Image (cartoon, grey):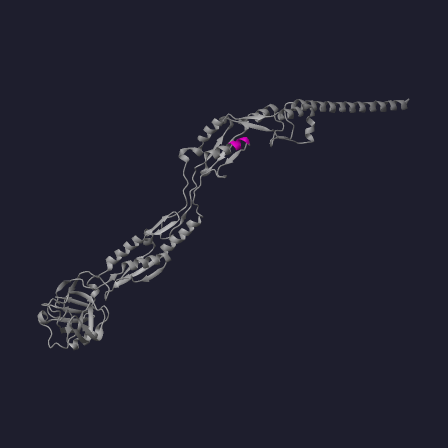
Amino acid sequence: MSKRKIKDGQEERGGTAFRRAMIAAGAIAAAAALVYLAGAFFFAGHYYWRTWIDGTDYSFRSREQVREELLNPSVSYELRIKGREDMEDVITPAELEMIYVFDNTLDKLNAQMTGLKWPVMFFRRGDYELPKMVTFSEEALHERLENTVFFDKSNLHAPVDAYISGYSREKGYEIVEEYPGTILDFDKVRAAVVEALEDLADTLDLTQGGFYRDAAVKADNKNLARALEKVNRYVSAEVTYDWNGEKEVIDGEVISEWITIDGSRVSLDEEAARAYINGLAKKHDTYGRDRNFTTSNGNTILLKSGSYGWWTDRAGETQALLASIRNGEQVEKEPLYFARGYTTGAPGEDIGNSYVEIDMGNQHLYLYIDGEIILESDFVSGNIARGYGTPAGVFGLTYKERNATLRGENYATPVDYWMPFNGNIGMHDAGWRNSFGGDIYMRSGSHGCINLPRDKAEIIYGYMEHNFPIVCYY
């Protein structure tokens, strides 16, 4: 009796466990069915997990919303255009009446991706591309481009070529970089925008691809570099003159005023250089100018020019200066002279303190050395009655010669000491005369020379050298 009861209890417990297992399995099956049905219902109107269309993840997205986005470009698309000087504009599809034209690929995709098959999404990823075309209004595009910031007249600036700057003492000349400008080729931009729209590109960079009109001459232009080298060589020149005792400097500041730069062509204004040299010569030359002179008697007189003083070779010095500039030389020099004074200084000062003073009115001569009278002597000058009067003025000794023969139309006279200073007029000994001074010169004077006693002529001769000043006056 007890054994049967035990067996029945075991059977009862086993049946209960089975029923429970079946109930659990049924519950799981019901839950799975519910999940499946819910998924089928959801994915009947939504895209599977890991669904990518044209590079965009549309997982779990509503098919109607996705269709709206894909078919209506204004929902998700815009073209951003970038240009120079941080200019930027955005073109939207609505402005161009832009629409997409698709084939039936999206419909096929939706038909294949049924709600009942949604579990396959756990086993594969879907990547799809939709063949499509865009259409837009050509007129609207043209008008929209005209109204972009890129073609706004206030933003249009022409390019400027690289060029050589003005001169500065610190840096000389430099190359100023070109300015690229903001002038665009409208037709090229329009064609690029059309292509970008058709490709649904997000951005279009106008700084690349040759859309802008560029400067013709860039900073790395070889001709410009050669011109820069030339012009800086010119202004590197410095000519320091000792001009009749005064310092004159011609440097880059001065030279730059004579330089003309036209693109990569450099020219040096020779006329300006000549005018500058002429100005300095006029300032410092004393040749041909009247002078105030204080005689040994204490009278201040006005001396006529004569052939004495500083006389610049203006043409020669201009060419020498231009050569120094072209070679970029730095030199210290005197200018070229046709004639030189015995000492430096303004007219009158250029006679200095060593000179021969010939007072023809009193027929008396003085020899000054360093401001001291070394010798005095009477003399006989040119015959006034016969028109041979000795010219007044200031002269420089031409040369001196011992034992010379003086020749004229009707004479040949030997002398021991010959010291010419005005053509064939000079000082010399006159051994044939017994007396000097007084008014001899009025009727029995020389042919223009200064006749001296031999001993006086000998002493004077010893002090004479080229260009020694001879002052003659009445």
Please state the horizontal and vertical placement of residue 265, each as a whole percent of the image: 38, 49
**Which residue corresponds to the image point at 38% horizontal and 55% vertical from the top-left?**
233
Q: Nearer the viewer, residue 433 or 23?
A: 433
Query: In which quadrant of the rendered view does residue 331 lie?
Result: bottom left
Please state the horizontal and vertical placement of residue 30, each as a whole percent of the image: 73, 22
Toward the right, the furthest residue is: 1
Q: Is residue 470 in sight in this rendering?
A: yes
Please state the horizontal and vertical placement of residue 123, each as a whole percent of the image: 70, 31
Let me know if residue 464 is in the magenta part: no
Q: Is residue 147 in sight in this rendering?
A: no
Q: Nearer the viewer, residue 441 or 288?
A: 441
Task: Say how many tags the image has.
Answer: 0
Q: Quadrant of the N terminus?
A: top right
Query: In which quadrant of the rendered view does residue 149 lie?
Result: top left
Let me know if residue 196 is in the magenta part: yes
Residue bounds of the magenta highlight: 194-198
Relative to 154, residue 332 above or below: below
Left or right of 279 in this view: 452: left
Relative to 417, residue 215 above or below: above
**Which residue corresponds to the image point at 42% horizontal and 33% vertical from the top-left?**
152
Q: Nearer the viewer, residue 112 or 461?
A: 461
Left or right of 359 in this view: 33: right
**Which residue corresponds to the image point at 16% horizontal and 69% vertical from the top-left?**
357
Q: Quadrant of the C terminus?
A: bottom left
Please state the horizontal and vertical placement of residue 273, each as a whole percent of the image: 30, 54
Toward the front, the furthest residue is: 410
Q: Mainly helix, strand or loop, the magenta region? A: helix
**Which residue corresponds to the image point at 24% horizontal and 59% vertical from the top-left?**
284
Left or right of 460 in this view: 263: right
